[in-house]
Amino acid sequence: MVDFSLSEEHKGLIETARRFTKERIIPIAAACDHESRFPMEVFREAWEIGLVNPTVPAEYGGSGMGELENAIITEELAYGCTGIQTSLLANGLALTPIKLGGSEEQKKKYLGLLTSEPVMASYATSEPDAGSDVAGIKTRFAQHGDDYVLNGQKCWITNASYARFYVIFATSNPDLRHKGIAAFIVDRDTPGLRVGKKEDKLGQRASDTAQIFLEDVVVPKANLLAPEGKGFKLAMETFNQTRPDIGAGATGLMRRCLDECVAYAKERKTFGTPIANHQLVQWMIAEMAIRVEATRLLYQKAAWNLDHGVRDPIVSSFAKAYGADSAMQTAVDAVQVFGGNGYVKEYPVEKLMRDAKVLQIYEGTSQIQRIVIAKQLFGG
C-alpha cells in the first residue's frame, strides 16, 4: 500500500528542526550573508541537538537516521538560509563515502570523530578544470612504499576553512579518466596541505567555500578509501546518496519564497486593492505552491529508495534537477511579486534569489542531471 504520511518521529524531527531554524538561523541569516560569515556557534548548537551527522550509524556514535530523515532536516534548515544549511549539513557529503566504502577502522576513527565532538569534514572532487566532469580531475597520487603522495588543487570545497579532515579524490594518470581515480582521507594537519582563499560568492555567502592545495602530501595506506579504479564509482554513488538533499534544500527555499510572497501580497496594494487580488500575482504564487509540493514528493521518493535499498539514480537526478530549476524560477518570481522592493536588501527575497542559483550548479549542474537521466532512459 502506498502511504504518503509521515510518522510521529518524523513530525517530531520536523518540529525540532523548524524551531531551531526560527530561533537560531532566521534572526542572523541576513547579517551572515552580508558579512560572508558562517556562524560556528550555530553549528555547535545544531550538533548538540542531533541535527548534524544524522545518518552516522549507531555503532559509531550516531543516531542512525535514514536519508529521508536527513532530507527532512535539510528542508527545514534551508527555509531559514540555504547557505547556513549547506555548511551545517556538509559533513554528510564527506561521511557518506566513508560509510559506503570505508574500512571498519576508518569508520570507527572518522565517523566516531564526527559524533564525539562538533567538528567539520569536507568532500573534495572539484578542481579548476573539473567540476561536473569528475573523471577529468588532475590532482595526482603516486604510491611510495606503503604511503601515497598527493599533488594538486581542489576548489569550491564547502567548509574547507574549518574541516578537520578531507575526503580527496585523485588520479594516477589523468589520461586514464575514471579508471585512474582513487579516494583518500586526509587529515587537516598533514604537512603540505594548505587551505587557500575563501571565495567571495554571489549567494549562499554564509557557507564557507575555499580552495585546497596539496604539495607532496603523504597519506598512509590506512587512509586509502578507494583504490585506483574504484574512486570514480564511489564519488558517483556518494552523489546518488546526497542529491536528494539538494531537492530538499530547494523545497525549503521555495517554501520561504511562498510564505514571504503570500504575506506581502496580502499587505501590498496597487490600483486600490491588495496585489493578492490580481490574477497574475495569484498565478505566480500558485505555481510556487505546485513546485514546492512536486519537489518534496521527488526528494522524499529518492530518499525512500535509498533507505529501502532501491538503487535508482534517475530519481535522485529528478529531485536535484527539477528542484534546483524550480527553486531558481520560484525565487525569480518572488522578486517579481515584491516588485521594486524585491530588488533591495531590506526585503528577504533578493537573498533567496541569489542563494537559489548555486542549487543549479553544485553536485552536478542541471545540465549534467539531464545527461544522467537521458543516459538511463536510453540504456547507456
Image: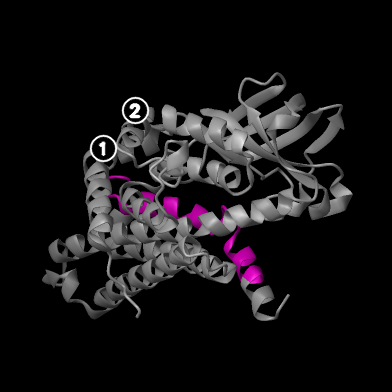
Tell me where residue 84 sits by quadrant.
top left
For disc 2, the marked residue is 41
Asked if residue 145 lies left or right of residue 105, the reply is: right
Residue drawn at the location 33% of the way across and 48% of the way down: 77
Residue drawn at the location 58% of the way across and 30% of the way down: 165
Q: What residue type is disc 1 on?
A: Arg
Dominant secondary structure, magenta: helix
Q: Is residue 263 above or below residue 378?
A: above
Q: Residue 291, can we see it?
A: yes
Residue drawn at the location 42% of the way across and 62% of the way down: 327
Q: Secondary structure at mark 2?
A: helix
Q: Quadrant of the C terminus?
A: bottom right
Mark 1 or mark 2, earlier in chain: 1
Q: Nearer the viewer, residue 11 or 319?
A: 11
Asked if residue 286 lies left or right of residue 123, the reply is: left
Residue drawn at the location 11% of the way across and 71% of the way down: 272
Label 1: how many residues lie within 10 Å, few (<14), some (14-19) or many (20+)? some
User: Where in the figure is residue 259, as x and y percent of width and height?
Assistant: 23, 60
Asked if residue 212 lies left or right of residue 219, the reply is: left
Q: How is the image coloured?
A: one colour
User: Where in the figure is residue 4, as x and y percent of width and height?
Assistant: 31, 73
User: Where in the figure is residue 156, as x and y percent of width and height?
Assistant: 60, 41
User: What range is drawn magenta here?
Assistant: 345-372
Residue 214's disc is none
Q: Is residue 314 above or below residue 8?
A: below
Q: Is residue 364 magenta?
A: yes
Instruction: Tell me the distance, in whole angstroms, between the alpha carbons under discs 1 and 2.
Output: 10 Å
Asked if residue 86 lies left or right of residue 197, the reply is: left
Tell me where residue 293 sits by quadrant.
bottom left
Residue 24's disc is 1
Q: Nearer the viewer, residue 206 or 45?
A: 45
